[in-house]
Image (tube, grey):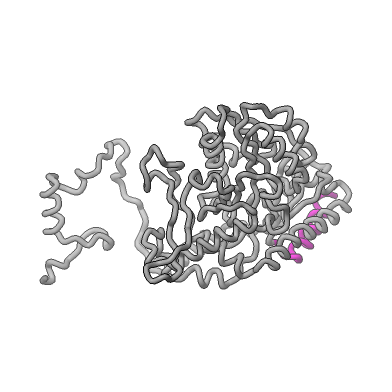
Amino acid sequence: MNESDTHTTGSPYAPHTDDGRTAMLDAIGVDSVDELFDIPEDVRFTDEFGIDARSERETRRLVRSVLDRNADLTELLGRGHYGYYIPSLVDHLADRSEFLTSYTQYQPEVSQGFLQALFEYQSLLVELTGLEIANCSMYDAATALGEAATLAERVRSTSGHRVLVPDLLREGRRSTLENYVAGTDLTVESYSTDDGTVDVDALESTVDDDVVMVYAENPTVRGTIEEQLESIGEVADGADALFVLGSDPVALSLLQRPADVGADVVIGDASVLGLPTSYGMGLGLFACSEEFLRQVPGRLVGVSEDATDRRAFTLTLQTREQHIRRERATSNICTNQAWVALRTAMHAASLGPNGMVDLAKRGVTRAEELAKRLDDLVGVQAPVHDRHHIREFVAHVDQPAPAIAEDLEKRGFAVHVVGEHEIQVCVAGVPDDDLDDFVAAMTEVVR
């Protein structure tokens, strides 16, 4: 091959020679690459992007100047997004090239390390939930909830179409669930809560033979601990409906195991470990009892032996339509967030069982202590709910909550406004010194 044959044009990631490109186009029967794309004229981009070429140093300087315009706030936000401290070893190990460049583990003979990490991730969830099966991760908690609903429709022995969720369910999670069931006969309905937890009597009066799934959360979106899980499970079981529980690995390390209160499926966001607060990017966990093994969406990693009797890991079950016939598929969910699950497994392993319990306990005690300090302020009552809390709580403020939040933001703190006179405060990942400064700021703004 001479020098002209190796000359490339266009993208450096598609290094075809002019002669090679011409030969391929001739074989296809078109004159140009543009003919391969059927893009309507009215949506084609024919202008310039207007982005000047810059060196790496100039680009870094530009990006830094843009990021410096971001408000530097201490975030006490929570409500499903938690920023725990991540040990540095997670970044160092997860950033190894063999993990970063491994899109998916179709070839087990060359993916043993990654497959083992996902197997350990599944094992972690099995231990925390008490359920026998956990898949090797999903998009996020909202899509995991949607998958739980469609699973309920498939496995329930009698006809039914109602999916019941608490009226406190966050809007984004509910809207995703409704999108999931839009192409089915399922409908999503709310049941009442009382003082931040499930009103079991109201739930019982709502449930009938038409209910296929009852969903509850522990902890709830307002940080309260659900104390009547067994009763909720009994109500669901009495209607032959699936009891689906939402939680996360940190909370599960301290709270009742879902299997012990009758949960059939557990969903949630596992990225409370391994990822910083991402406000959208997550890691869906999905665990269930063994009877639903072949209905689990996504993929399962299993352990076996190779031809030489050595322990070997492989993808043992893949139920998405890209792998099997469409009519047999349980879901069309594609990615399994493998790299994020890897980070979660690493973070959990670095903490160990005692470390995870300690982390969860700190979420209880620090939230309780902060609520007491705020409750001592004139014009603040905290927490609103007479319940145990973990990580976060709702506080009542006599002044309008939006005005309080705005004044706090000017002082460098961000909180959620959840009612006309209610703000929500989360302590997860916030250093003690910053909590002291937050109390001082609250003292000023509520005067």
Split into 4 quadrants, where in the image is the N terminus? Answer: bottom left
Q: Is residue 353 above or below residue 175?
A: below
Question: What stretch of residues is rendered in magenta?
Answer: 430-447
**Along the line of sight, the residue nearer the viewer: 224 or 420:** 224
Residue 156 appears in which quarter of the rendering? top right
Residue 367 relative to residue 36: left or right: right
State yes or no: residue 65 in magenta.
Answer: no
| Residue 330 showing in the rendered view | yes
Kindly identify the residue that appears in the image at 56 percent across and 32 percent down. 157
Residue 75 appears in which quarter of the rendering? bottom right
State yes or no: residue 442 in magenta.
Answer: yes
Image position, residue 34 (x, y; %): 21, 46
Total labels drawn: 0
Image position, residue 303 (x, y; %): 47, 62
Kindly identify the residue that appears in the image at 78 percent across and 32 percent down. 201
Q: Main secondary structure of the magenta part?
A: helix
Kindly identify the residue that appears in the image at 63 percent across and 58 percent down. 127
Image position, residue 115 (x, y; %): 46, 63
| Residue 59 showing in the rendered view | no
**Along the line of sight, the residue nearer the viewer: 250 or 439:** 250
Kindly identify the residue that appears in the image at 62 percent across and 38 percent down. 242
Image position, residue 81 (x, y; %): 63, 52
**Along the line of sight, the residue nearer the viewer: 406 or 247:** 247
